[in-house]
Image (spheres, grey):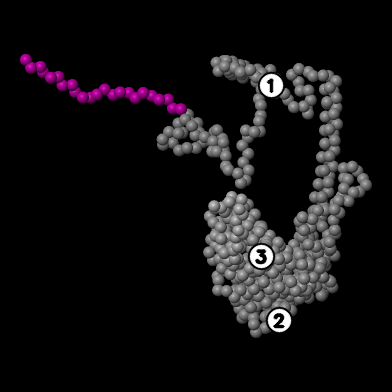
């Protein structure tokens, strides 16, 4: 007999392969509760405990994570799930995090051809969030040069220089399109780090034989750098006042300084003249060489000195520093802002002045209203409560008890009031005023139908106004449903009965 208090012997821990198989089955389940429980186990307990995972096990794990996102519905749940998957890049150790990111790129290329158009947007968002987490790893190491080279090697080997035979070109296209937008919050960088980040794209344009990818890199990366570089030269020539608004100021300075200080014209010429360059890409490469060379000549002619470290990072969560100043009580604090090389638009200054003036007016109005309210309460307290009048504005109105009337009594009152209004309208005299009438109307916001996004739609009888609801003869067969329309009633006339034209044949009675 086994005693109840006897402890069971500890079970041996399963190997990684067996644990991974059970987790993958639950991650790819059709039920959301099973998927969430399994994902919580993977991200919180199982994955952080591993020091190294075999390549095959990591691929199987990512296949389960892929189908976990595949089954996810509703945009809010999808965004939350993608954030949880991308946040694992910062929580894992660096070698495991790089392996996690590399297998993610491999899985996306392998499964890309199976994604239908309805599920494409959430996988686009997944790539963007992983790119952002990838640059956060680079920024967390203080942009170490060796680590940056290693990170960029993992990114380029998994996308542009991938040696697999999968039809996953869409992953490379989207990385090329989203690269500038995702790396922008982490700029500016040192010149050595910027060369490691941007220079490999010149090699990609020369080596890759995909014309669509070459066009994506040109339009989304180098054309953007050229545009901001030209804009920065114009602003510097004008003495720092080129009509650039504050929102575009940082982008022009940061991206323009990258374009002016990286010597892309020389790099494109070396790539276009090398034997490794594809013949079909030389035309695009030499065109970019010509444009960047002209931009460099404009910089030399104007005598502008540009550094790659100019500008500031785009930090949306940064709280402005509040500095107290002496002055009026209405403006007790002022926001201190760092001034960059470019000046603000005159339009933004006017808007700021208008906003400050509006704030002063509103504060003065609030002060006047509070004074009037105090005077009113003082007078009301001296006069005392008066019948049929409100004691104070701030006091809540007491509920009025209305005696219930019978249906017969209500009908009689309704008839009397209606007849009085009709007589007053015919005689041209004013009818009974609202002050004399004993009827009181109450308004309640609880019964108002307010529809918010991501909530179920209210029933149809609440959404349609009464005039649009078909009733009466509109519900009869043959009449389409819709708004009720009034028609002039035609008088019904009785049909005249025509006398029968049959001849009455009298039968002779037989005698």
Residue 346 found in image quarter: bottom right
Of labels 3 and 2, earlier in sequence is: 3
Q: Between 31 and 352, which is closer to the camera in this rendering?
A: 31
Of labels 1 and 3, earlier in sequence is: 3
Q: Is residue 76 visible?
A: yes
Give the dominant element type of the magenta stretch: helix, strand or loop. loop
Q: Are marks 2 and 1 in contact (CB under 8 Å)?
A: no
- Tell which residue pokes out farthest to the right in this image: 326
Mark 3 secondary-structure assignment: loop
Left or right of residue 429: residue 358: right
Q: So how many labels did they put on this image?
A: 3
Residue 390's spot in the image, x, y percent?
Answer: 76, 23
Q: Which residues are magenta?
A: 489-511
In the depicted structure, whether residue 106 falls above or below residue 275: above
State the residue position of label 1.
400
Q: Determine crowd level at label 1: few under 14, some 14-19, many 20+ residues with C-alpha closer than 10 A.
A: few
Residue 322's spot in the image, x, y percent?
Answer: 86, 51
Q: Are marks 1 and 3 in contact (CB under 8 Å)?
A: no
Work out how far the residue at label 2 is from the one at label 1, CA to CA, in angstroms.
90 Å
Residue 86's spot in the image, x, y percent?
Answer: 66, 61
Left or right of residue 233: residue 89: left
State the residue position of label 2.
270
In the depicted structure, whether residue 340 falls above or below residue 365: below
Closer to viewer: mark 2 or mark 1: 1
State the residue position of label 3.
50
């Amino acid at each position: 007999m086994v005693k109840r208090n006897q402890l069971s012997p500890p079970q041996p821990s399963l190997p990684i392969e067996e644990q991974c198989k059970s987790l993958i089955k639950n991650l790819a389940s059709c039920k959301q509760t099973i998927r969430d429980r399994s994902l919580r186990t993977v991200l919180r307990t199982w994955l952080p405990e591993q020091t190294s995972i075999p390549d095959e096990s990591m691929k199987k794990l990512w296949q389960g994570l892929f189908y976990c996102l595949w089954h996810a519905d509703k945009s809010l749940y999808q965004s939350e799930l993608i954030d949880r998957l991308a946040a694992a890049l910062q929580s894992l150790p660096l070698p495991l995090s790089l392996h996690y990111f590399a297998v993610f790129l491999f899985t996306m290329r392998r499964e890309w051809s199976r994604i239908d158009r309805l599920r494409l947007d959430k996988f686009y968002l997944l790539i963007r969030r992983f790119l952002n987490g990838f640059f956060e790893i680079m920024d967390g190491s203080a942009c170490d040069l060796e680590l940056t080279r290693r990170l960029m090697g993992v990114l380029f080997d998994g996308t542009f220089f991938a040696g697999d035979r999968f039809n996953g070109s869409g992953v490379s296209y989207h990385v090329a399109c989203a690269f500038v937008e995702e790396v922008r919050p982490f700029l500016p960088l040192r010149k050595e780090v910027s060369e490691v980040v941007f220079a490999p794209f010149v090699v990609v344009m020369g080596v890759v034989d995909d014309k669509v990818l070459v066009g994506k890199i040109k339009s989304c990366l180098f054309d953007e750098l050229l545009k901001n570089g030209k804009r920065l030269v114009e602003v510097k020539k004008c003495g720092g006042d080129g009509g650039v608004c504050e929102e575009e100021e940082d982008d022009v300075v940061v991206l323009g300084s990258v374009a002016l200080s990286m010597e892309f014209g020389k790099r494109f010429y070396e790539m276009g003249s090398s034997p490794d360059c594809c013949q079909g890409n030389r035309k695009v490469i030499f065109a970019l060489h010509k444009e960047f060379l002209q931009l460099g000549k404009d910089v030399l002619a104007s005598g502008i000195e540009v550094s790659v470290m100019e500008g500031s990072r785009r930090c949306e969560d940064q709280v402005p520093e509040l500095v107290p100043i002496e002055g009026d009580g209405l403006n007790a604090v002022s926001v201190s802002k760092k001034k960059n090389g470019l000046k603000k638009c005159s339009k933004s200054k006017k808007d700021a002045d208008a906003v400050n003036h509006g704030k002063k007016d509103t504060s003065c109005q609030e002060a006047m209203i509070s004074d009037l309210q105090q005077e009113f309460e003082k007078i009301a307290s001296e006069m005392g409560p008066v019948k049929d009048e409100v004691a104070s504005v701030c006091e809540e109105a007491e509920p009025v008890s209305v005696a219930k009337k019978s249906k017969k009594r209500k009908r009689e009152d309704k008839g009397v009031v209606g007849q009085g209004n009709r007589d007053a309208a015919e005689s041209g005299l004013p009818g009974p005023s609202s002050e004399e009438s004993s009827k009181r109307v109450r308004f309640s916001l609880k019964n108002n139908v307010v529809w918010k996004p991501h909530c179920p739609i209210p029933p149809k009888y609440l959404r349609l106004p009464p005039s649009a609801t078909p009733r009466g003869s509109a519900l009869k067969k043959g009449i389409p449903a819709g708004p009720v329309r009034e028609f002039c009633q035609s008088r019904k006339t009785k049909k005249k009965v025509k006398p029968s034209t049959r001849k009455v044949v009298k039968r002779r009675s037989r005698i």
